[in-house]
Image (cartoon, helix red, strand yellow):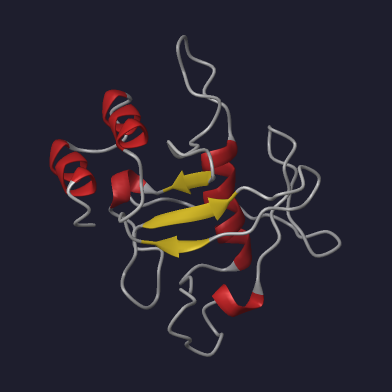
Amino acid sequence: MAHVFASHSMIAGKFGPTPNGHYYQPVSYHNPTARKKDDKNRWILTQSEQYEVFEIADTPDTSKGGRKCWMNDDGKGLYSMLDGCDYVLGKDNEERLAFFPKPSNELDSWHGYPIDSASIGDDLVEYWKNKQLISEITYRRLLAHEL
């Protein structure tokens, strides 16, 4: 089933807060209409849709033994995906994951961009598999950094 996006409103240049109390501020050079730059991935998503992908990653899992959020193994940011990584998020290389770097100042807004699986941690991939959020084949592809 394809993901159905809700509508989110931007206030004072940012979206939020998430259930964790965080805000998301889109960055213009990652937007779909931005000029292509070799070092900047671009979304295919609207800014409201970008926020929803962030909110999914930042929403606590309240089940017993659940993660606080989808923080990568190195603690440097959140990863997110839609529909078991079946939904393409990135415009340039059909990236299916999104990365949201943790702000250095806790009060700052987050931002993010589509990314491949080159730096995703095995613990997070294992968590997604155990929660049945990804298929076995996607699990193997993520661990092999082939997605």
On screen, residue 78 versus residue 86, left or right, reads right
Q: List x then y, in percent, for residue 139.
A: 20, 40
Q: Residue at x 21, y 43 (%)?
A: 143
Instruction: Identify which residue is drawn at 40% across, 75% down.
Output: 91
Q: Nearer the viewer, residue 116 or 8?
A: 116
Q: Position of residue 23 (x, y in %)?
A: 73, 49
Expressed as whole percent of the image width and height from the top left, the position of residue 92 reads 36, 78
Left/right placement of residue 120 relative to residue 105 reads left
Q: Position of residue 6 (x, y in %)?
A: 58, 51
Q: Is residue 32 left or right of residue 130?
A: right
Kindly tell me whether residue 5 is visible in this rendering: no
Residue extending furthest right? 12
**Number of callouts:** 0
Towards the viewer: 43 or 116: 116
Residue in view at x 45 percent, y 47 percent: 80
Residue 136 showing in the rendered view: yes
Residue 94 is drawn in which quadrant? bottom left
Q: Quadrant of the C terminus?
A: bottom left
Spot the residue most to the top: 64
